[in-house]
């Protein structure tokens, strides 16, 4: 199973994760790259979506909501995210005011919820972890926000620190201890020539895959533990999304490494 993809992102709509690809059943991802004045529009049919502005600024029109100008950062390392939750049946248009990059996650749903915008001032960022595994996490549409399946956010790891650590997983429907959710990471580095390491492994050893991760890499996590670290001197960022049969969030940490907390 190929869990990693190097993504080239030319101008336009880059469908970097399509339905059913890379071992996943629920998640899709487009990266939309627009020049000033260019626009993208879509009507979500039997799917909900979450739009996250990665860089630049754009005018976002969602039927039934006031028009918003979203995007307040030059890159993913320079501020909090902004975006929108887009319920099933929603028609939206995004028009770039500057060079703009946006990520659009989708998942199939049978329920319609109201769309809403996510503004910088409402995004809560917090430091998590401990010595040598600290990071800053910002929810875009967190577990407490309204959505049918999707949960999304951003993580920025401190220089040389591990993240998604101690190793944890969420691949079993065993509430209240653990929920069943697949996940995706989309990576950025500063400087862009940086790199990191990631390991995806399962309890039974059926998957044990180390990988070198670079700028604009996509990694799918259908199951298993999934720690990640950046090389010293480089900042690491990843946009993440989770989805599964139920919108419940409980993780199980690897007992062999849980003691580091």
Image (cartoon, grey):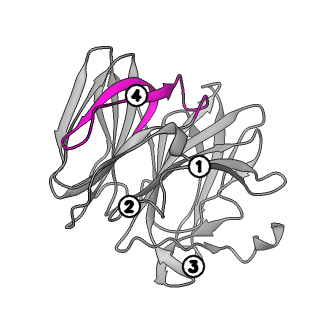
Q: CA distance from mark 3 to mark 1?
A: 36 Å
- Choose the circle earlier in sequence order: 3 or 1: 1
Which residue bears the numbered disc 3? 204
Q: CA distance from mark 3 to mark 4?
A: 39 Å
Residue density around tag 4, few if under 14, some if 14–19, many if 20 or more, within 10 Å: many
Left or right: residue 2 versus residue 232 is left
Residue density around tag 2, few if under 14, some if 14–19, many if 20 or more, within 10 Å: some
Q: CA distance from mark 4 to mark 2?
A: 24 Å
Numbered range of the magenta stretch: 52-79
- Choose the circle earlier in sequence order: 1 or 2: 1
Q: Residue furthest front?
A: 66
Left or right: residue 93 versus residue 124 is left
Q: Nearer the viewer, residue 186 or 137?
A: 137
- Choose the circle earlier in sequence order: 4 or 2: 4
Which residue bears the numbered disc 2? 146
Quadrant hosting residue 104: top left
């Amino acid at each position: 199973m190929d869990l990693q993809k190097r993504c080239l992102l030319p101008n336009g709509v880059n469908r970097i994760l399509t339905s059913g690809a890379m071992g996943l059943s629920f998640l899709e991802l487009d990266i939309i790259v627009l020049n000033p004045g260019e626009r993208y529009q879509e009507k979500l049919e039997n799917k909900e979506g979450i739009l996250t502005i990665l860089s630049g600024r754009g005018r976002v029109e969602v039927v039934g909501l006031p028009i918003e100008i979203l995007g307040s950062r030059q890159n993913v390392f320079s501020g909090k995210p902004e975006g929108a939750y887009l319920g099933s049946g929603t028609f939206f248009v995004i028009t770039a005011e500057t060079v703009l990059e946006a990520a659009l996650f989708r998942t199939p749903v049978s329920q319609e919820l109201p769309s809403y915008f996510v503004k910088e001032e409402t995004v809560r960022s917090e430091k998590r972890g401990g010595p040598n595994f600290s990071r800053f996490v910002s929810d875009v549409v967190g577990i407490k926000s309204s959505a049918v399946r999707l949960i999304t956010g951003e993580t920025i790891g401190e220089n040389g620190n591990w993240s998604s650590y101690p190793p944890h997983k969420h691949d079993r429907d065993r509430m209240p201890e653990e929920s069943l959710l697949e996940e995706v990471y989309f990576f950025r580095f500063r400087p862009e020539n940086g790199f990191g390491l990631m390991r995806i492994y399962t309890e039974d050893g059926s998957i044990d895959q180390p990988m070198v991760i670079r700028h604009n890499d996509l990694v799918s996590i259908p199951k298993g533990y999934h720690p990640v670290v950046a090389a010293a001197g480089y900042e690491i960022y990843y946009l993440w999304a989770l989805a599964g049969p139920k919108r419940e969030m409980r993780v199980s940490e690897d007992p062999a490494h849980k003691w580091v907390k």
